[in-house]
Amino acid sequence: MTEAGEENIVLEGFLCPICKVDFGVDLKLFLHFQEAHSEDQDLVKSFKDLFGKAKEKILKNDIGKKEERHYVWEPQEIGEVQSHFQYFKHCRNKWVEHFVMETNKTVVRLEKLLCNLPQDPNKRKTHEQTIVHWLDGKDVTRCPDCTKSFNITRRQHHCRLCGSIVCHECSCFLPLAKAYETINETAKNQLTSLTQSSPSFRLCVHCGQVLENREQIKYRDLKPLMCDYYDKIIECRNKIENDLLIKFNQTYNLLKEGESSYLTEANRIRSDIVKLAEAIDALSNRILKLENDTNSSKVTTKNIRLAMIQCVQSTVLAIPALPSLKEIEEIAQRKREAAEARLRNGQDLDKPKISQSVSKRHSTQKNEIKLRLEDGWSPVTNANVNSDNPVVEQMNIIKNYIKQAKEAYRFDEVASLERNLQELNEEYFKMQNDSGNMPGYSTKN
Amino acid sequence: MANRAVPQRPNGQTPGKICQFKLVLLGESSVGKSSLVLRFVKGQFHEYQESTIGAAFLTQTIHLNDVAVKFEIWDTAGQERYHSLAPMYYRGAQAAIVVYDITNQDTFERAKNWVKELQRQATPGIVIALAGNKLDLNTMRSVQTDESQTYAYENGLLFMETSAKTSANVTEIFKAIAEKLPKNETTNTAGQGRRLVESEGANKSLSSCCK
């Protein structure tokens, strides 16, 4: 109804927004509006459009601003690094502390429970209640874990470690044996007497989880013994395959060429290989004899043992027997004779054949040993020639060489060396001219 | 003493031509240049050869028929610090051995660079030999024989895989170089007067290299 007050008019009802007439029913108002103000609708529409556009613009602006805010982060200085590690540590430490405290509390309570635990169920219950305060059953109507209400079939149970009330489904049992294990006590005499009466504690899932985690952490860093042995085996194997066998083959080839001086060395390497092979054998045997609970680990140990037996056999059997000293000397003798024969014939000097074959190489080398021993000459490099400038260093070396060559009456060499010294001198002065301040060179001889 | 001054050649050989050649060894450090030369000159091998300072000088003569080929060997240091010295030694050289280590691919690449440098800047007609050293470590090989063989063939190099340790192919490679070197220029009749000819010999080898 319309209430006419001159100034502060409050109109109610189905009013036309333009001529402010009350039509009583919505249908009437609708029709009136269609008839009388159809031309005004455009106006409304245009208003709406205007608002829409404004809205759009504002939204756009907002997005733009957001983008701008993102953009602010972009031009960071290159290479600037911020470490969030401290923050991470802070957060993590809080958690770890909380967790550790919880665990410790639980374990301490468990220890107290286990201390002087009575056998009689009733006494035991009171003992448990003196250690941990049990929640009053009246206060709890629903299991806090599954939120199901308690009734005759779903009965209340107390967690022996925290005293809270849970239903049967939301609780677990800690066997006494495991409980003693947890607090590092091997009180077996107590255990046997207790097992018949009540073998376990009822815990809520939460406390159970805490103890479980603690166990897992305990065993996390503990590698099974098998791994230790296996690592040792691999170490031995690598040493044989990557080091000793290569060395052995080298020395063995030398022996086959008649170099008897390598015999002891070869023998030593051979015995080293055999020793390591024996070690592998023993270790793999020990792995096989380890106690195993699961079938799969039994299979693993068996496989390791088989593989190692095969490995040892293949390496040890592959090592050829060493020739005896006599045999080596025979080889050397034969080679010497062949070389001498060739030397007498002069074939080798007439047509020296370059070949990679071992025997030929050996014989040609033998041919020239004579020449080499008489002719080869080399001065000794004096270590005390150090200088900043390699050219100066070299000049000092050459001077030393000349002195040695003169002493040995090697005048050809003296001539060549002096020529080289001359060149070095020229080079040195050229360098000095190029860059005014080279490190000083003393011209004294 | 007097005895040591004279014997530039072994007893019992008829005096013949003596050719003197300058030979330079190039290559990355610790590929075995010094070991190779020491094996050739003295027949020795040291497992822990000290690294060369500057350039070491050694001489050795080998006899091919009645021709004595005397090598004046300049064993250059492989370390980077001494690379400025290398040109002085390969400039007048008639022969060069570029050494690499068959167990190390990098040294082979470095050897290729040395070959390039020699072909550009050394005496034209220099005899270059490529030596893949440490053949005794054949099991650890990383440069295949085929690869270096082809490279040597394409660049007209002598090529051998050597081992200073077992002395495989050491003498052979010097011999191959001696054979390839021209032997008609410097001819000396050996004898007592040999030691007086030093200046003459010097002049001759000076004229033979491009300075």
Image (cartoon, grey):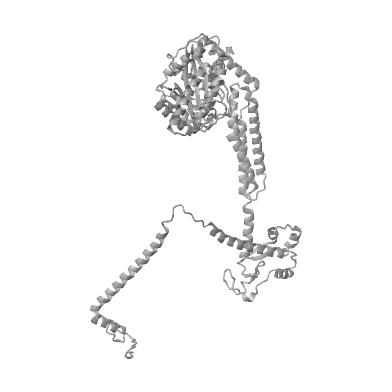
Quadrant position of the N terminus of chain A in the picture: bottom left
Percent of width and height locating residue A355: 49, 21
Q: Residue at x 55, y 9 (%)?
A: B12
The foreground one among B111 and A437 is A437
Quadrant of residue A67 within the rendered picture:
bottom left
Q: Quick check: A131 above or below A17?
A: above
Q: Residue at x 61, y 63 (%)?
A: A98
Percent of width and height locating residue A314: 60, 34
The foreground one among B157 and A419 is A419
A121 on left or right of B158: right
Q: Residue at x 43, y 56 (%)?
A: A76
Q: How many marks?
A: 0
Percent of width and height locating residue A259: 61, 22
Q: Quick check: B148 above or below A363?
A: below
Percent of width and height locating residue B1: 59, 13
Q: Mark yes or no: residue A396 visible.
A: yes
Quadrant of residue A313 within the rendered picture:
top right
A175 on left or right of A91: right
Q: Mark yes or no: residue B191 visible.
A: no
The foreground one among A105 and A130 is A105
Quadrant position of the C terminus of chain A in the picture: top right
Q: Quick check: B153 above or below A124?
A: above
